[in-house]
Amino acid sequence: MMDSPVGVAAWIVEKFYHWSDLKDGNLDSTYKKDDLLTNIMIYILTKSFNTSSWIYYGRAKEGGRILSEEGRRVEVPTGCAVYPKEFLTWPPKSYVEKLFNLVHWTEMKKGGHFAALEQPSSLIKDIQDFCKKVAI
């Protein structure tokens, strides 16, 4: 992909289209063209497309979301903002609680994989709410 800026652009736009909570299936209703182009150019100019996409290949190749070889629960305080149009479905909260020290869980009304661009206000508020719970 790195030798084709058009390929990178097509890949990224396709992901924004399918992994977002679009109004009437229209990218322009959710994202500004300048924001999409900036996102694309960051990957092209920094030559980071390959490394940024490794997680998707690696997850498929290595078999999912393995936490540790020993299967230990993650005890670090954890918060989850669950957006309805995320491209991978979240497991139920009860399952997440078994694997993580879950202190904050929010099921959002709208948004998808790119929540920071789609729903920045709800994401910021949720991060602030989580931080208030774990502040020392």
Image: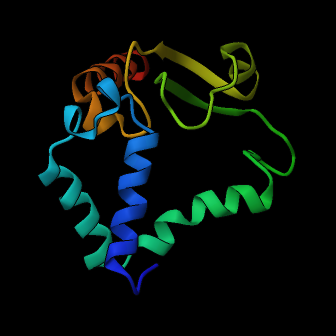
Q: Is residue 58 left or right of residue 26?
A: right
- Residue drawn at point x = 42 percent, y = 31 percent: 112
The part of the image, by quadrant, that contains residue 127 is: top left
Q: At 28% from the left edge and 20% from the top edge, which residue is drawn?
A: 122
Q: Residue furthest right?
A: 70
Foreground residue among 70 and 41 = 41
Q: Coloring scheme of the render?
A: rainbow
Return the residue nearer the eye: 11 or 46.
Answer: 11
Give the mark count: 0
Q: Quadrant for residue 103, please give it.
A: top right
Image spot of residue 59 (x, y percent): 69, 55
The image shows residue 12, relative to residue 122, as above or below, that is below
Q: Nearer the viewer, residue 33 or 61?
A: 33
**In the image, residue 106 above or below residue 6:** above
Q: Position of residue 49 (x, y in %)?
A: 42, 71
* Residue for point 43% across, 22% down: 134
| Quarter of the image that includes the C terminus | top left
Query: For the point 49% across and 74% down, which residue is it?
Result: 50
Depth check, front residue: 99 or 134 = 99
Q: Position of residue 78 (x, y in %)?
A: 54, 28
Residue 126 in the figure: left or right of residue 85: left
